[in-house]
Image: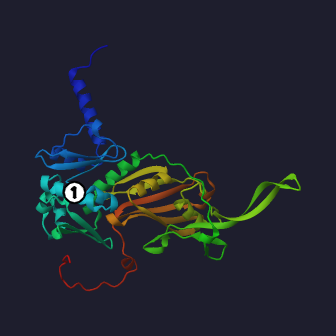
């Protein structure tokens, strides 16, 4: 065997190291944080779903957390107890822990976003050196618009901050980077999804829907009643063969029963479309969805995958899914699906279209124009209420 020249070996080793480094961090922001802070991390030490304490180059405690795939998903200065994180989940933890790290070590060039954090008591230095993970802490969510975080020691306030619910702020990142990370994670996401049998639905759980013999299993709604998680049913006669004994003789009897079944019928296109998008069981076939992502700076990217995979990915990131049918005309049907994460201050919007003849296919195809990280919409603004005159007063924490 002819040995490789030394320079080629070095190039191969360098490329392998770069590849390993890239795949172990969920974002460039975290990779830069590890480099700037001086964390010593080897790829084989990154176990899945693990939180480990590390020392920064100045000796300060910094924690690192991995996701189920072993990728680094968070680096920060610990400000909250682990018990509180478990009992009261909130996006505030990861935001503030990284924000303090960023303030101290200047991880990102953009430090201006930190000015959106409002201090009523204390300052960034207090958060960094106050040993707050040992304090009593309370977090208040004010209508998904503002988080109030308060730390107390022996009944006295140590620090109180207000954090606007804005998706870029809470993610310590820009929309462009978040879109890139979303697509990167989505493409790598490969859960083991099995379509479960349709659950038995008691008629008492259903409400009458319209005048065409349909019923609805009501789900949650978002913004307006039409944007919801409803599943639609119709009553169907089912014949079942039952073995029994009559006069000491085995007999097979056919018994009819009227049961609710999920609507999957071109006669009801709007309800069938809703069921295809919202059902997670084998009452409807698996949808193949063609996603056309409309990204920042007018970039676009297309991805095709099973709908169940997309929905599982969105739910893993804390999103609730809501659907509304928009137009049914000449065999064309349109709708919208929102993936909403109000605690983090964003929606993903899927503008959907298909044709009614797809309902008869083993794997119906749906096309979607996708817009990521859209701020939540107030119902009052959606219907155009008249603006009120601003007083000019500045916002203050209570």
Q: Residue at x 39, y 50 (%)?
A: 186
Q: Is 5 in front, or is 50? A: 50
Q: Is 81 in front, or is 378? A: 81
Q: Residue at x 30, y 57 (%)?
A: 83
Q: Could you tell me residue 243's position as x and y percent?
A: 79, 53
**Up-down relation of residue 28 to residue 94 (above or below):** above
Q: Is residue 232 visible?
A: yes
Residue ID for mark 1: 97
**Up-down relation of residue 20 to residue 296 (above or below):** above
The N terminus lies in which quarter of the figure? top left
Identify the element where label 1 is drawn.
helix
Q: Could you tell me residue 323's position as x and y percent?
A: 49, 66
Q: Is residue 119 visible?
A: no
Q: Could you tell me residue 67's position as x and y percent?
A: 34, 48
Image check: 212 left or right of 181? right
Q: Is 140 in front, or is 394? A: 140
Residue farthest toward the top in the current orientation of the protein: 1
What coloring was used for the rendering? rainbow
Q: Could you tell me residue 282's position as x and y percent?
A: 59, 54
């Amino acid at each position: 065997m002819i040995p490789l020249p030394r320079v080629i070996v070095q190039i191969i080793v360098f490329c392998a190291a770069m590849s390993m480094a890239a795949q172990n961090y969920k974002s460039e922001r975290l990779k830069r944080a590890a480099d700037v802070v001086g964390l010593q991390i080897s790829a084989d030490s990154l176990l899945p779903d693990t939180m480990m304490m590390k020392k920064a180059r100045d000796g300060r405690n910094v924690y690192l957390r991995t996701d189920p795939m072993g990728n680094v998903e968070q680096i920060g200065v610990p400000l909250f107890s682990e018990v509180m994180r478990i009992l009261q989940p909130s996006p505030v933890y990861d935001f503030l822990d990284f924000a303090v790290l960023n303030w101290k070590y200047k991880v990102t060039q953009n430090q201006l976003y930190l000015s959106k954090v409002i201090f009523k008591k204390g300052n960034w230095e207090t958060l960094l050196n106050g040993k707050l993970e040992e304090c009593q802490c309370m977090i208040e969510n004010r209508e998904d618009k503002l988080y109030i975080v308060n730390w107390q020691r022996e009944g006295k306030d140590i620090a109180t901050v207000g954090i606007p619910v804005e998706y870029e702020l809470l993610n310590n990142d820009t929309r462009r980077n978040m879109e890139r990370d979303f697509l990167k994670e989505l493409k790598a996401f490969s859960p083991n999804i099995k379509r479960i049998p349709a659950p038995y639905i008691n008629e008492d759980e259903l409400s009458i829907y319209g005048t065409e013999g349909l019923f609805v299993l009501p789900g949650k709604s978002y913004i307006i009643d039409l944007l919801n998680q409803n599943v639609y049913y119709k009553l169907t006669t089912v014949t079942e063969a039952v073995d029994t004994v009559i006069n000491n003789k085995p007999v097979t009897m056919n018994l009819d029963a009227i049961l609710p079944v999920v609507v999957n019928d071109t006669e009801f296109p709007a309800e069938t479309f809703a069921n295809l998008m919202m059902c997670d069981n084998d009452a409807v076939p698996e949808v193949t969805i063609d996603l056309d992502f409309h990204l920042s700076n007018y970039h676009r990217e297309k991805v095709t995958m099973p709908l169940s995979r997309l929905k599982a990915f969105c739910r893993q990131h804390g999103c609730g899914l809501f659907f509304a049918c928009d137009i049914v005309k000449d065999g064309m049907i349109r709708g919208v699906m929102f993936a909403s994460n109000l605690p983090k201050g964003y929606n993903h919007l899927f503008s959907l279209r298909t044709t009614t003849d797809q309902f008869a296919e083993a794997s119906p195809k749906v096309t979607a124009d996708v817009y990521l990280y859209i701020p939540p919409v107030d119902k009052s603004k959606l219907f155009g209420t008249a603006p009120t005159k601003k007083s000019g007063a500045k916002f203050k924490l209570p």
